[in-house]
Image (cartoon, helix red, strand yellow):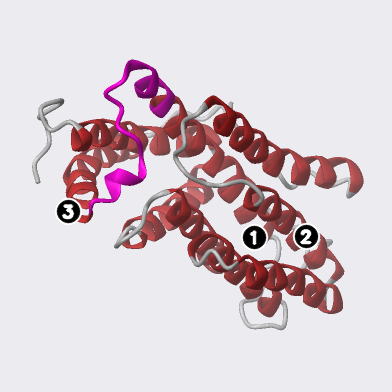
Amino acid sequence: MKLTLDDPPRTALSWKLLPAVLLSLSGVLLFAVANDPAGYTTLVLSVLTAAFIDRQLARHLGLIAAGLAIISFVPLNADLSIGHMLQMGGALGMAVLVPWLVSRFAYREQIIKFPVNTGRKWPLAAKLYLLGVVALGFLILPVYLISTGVFQNWPDASDPTIFWRLFLGVNAVGIWDELFFICTTFTLLRRHFPDWLANILQAVIFSSFLWEIGYQAWGPLLTFPFALLQGYTFKLTKSLTYVVSVHLIFDFVLFLALVHAHNRDWLPIFFY
């Protein structure tokens, strides 16, 4: 990320860290703990505290807080009824759109971007990494889903209608994760903190969201490192296309593993 003379200093140890930690904590309270009163209180306290410390930080944390508040208003689960899919899809869309619109047209900033066509070819290492994601997914996901029983947090896809809705839902949420947690949350936090610290802060919120979606039991041991890797990968590649590709490849293996977990005679391609 290129910095200019107008950009705030990016330091790890300063009073600015306090409201940022409160913001991440609010994500844990809202999504992982499901304590809405404590979560909303901490969310508001984060922005108010930032307002006393740094005006630009308060603006940026406010954008993230707005997105978190929007998605917290709907049940975050794998209910595949048309009504819930539309409700959840609308909330997720607004959680990305509102921060982008406010940042671009109210604050006159061009910080939140969604770089799709970067003009850069993926090097061999990037292509090999995609293969590694497939291998890790096949090795880890069936063991995790079946040994813990968390596959039951997603519906049985033996019905053709549910099969395709599950496929659509898994992929749609995967794309949204990168739009909000990486291109929005991580990007805004990087304006104020070193990349490694901004990445940790976003990964806490990212993995908390995934907990409520269904990645429970020892799921955070998978989702937190995954969120960190996605942030680091975006830092290296500066490409939404690439991090979405990584996520969708992993989610495709997840989809296959979920289908198998509910119907053990289907897709007997996993080892666990």
Residue in the foreground of this view, choosing between 176 and 148: 148
Q: Which residue is mark 2?
A: 62
Q: Nearer the viewer, mark 3 or mark 2?
A: 3
Question: Is residue 165 found inside the magenta-colored segment of the image?
Answer: yes
Q: Nearer the viewer, mark 3 or mark 1?
A: 3
Q: Tell me which label, 3 or 1, sits earlier in the chain.
A: 3
Residue in the foreground of this view, choosing between 66 and 34: 34
Cα distance between the residues tagged 3 and 1 = 37 Å
In the picture, the disc for residue 147 is 3
> Quadrant of residue 190 in the image?
bottom right
| Mark 2 residue type | Gly
The range drawn in magenta is 149-166
Q: Is residue 48 visible?
A: yes
Residue 78, given in percent of the width and then of the height, sits at: 44, 39
Q: Is residue 194 visible?
A: no
Q: Secondary structure at mark 1?
A: helix
Cα distance between the residues tagged 3 and 2 = 40 Å
In the picture, the disc for residue 190 is 1
Q: Tell me which label, 3 or 2, sits earlier in the chain.
A: 2
> Quadrant of residue 117 in the image?
top right
At label 2, counting other C-alpha atoms closer than 10 Å, the crowd grade (few under 14, some 14-19, many 20 or more) is many
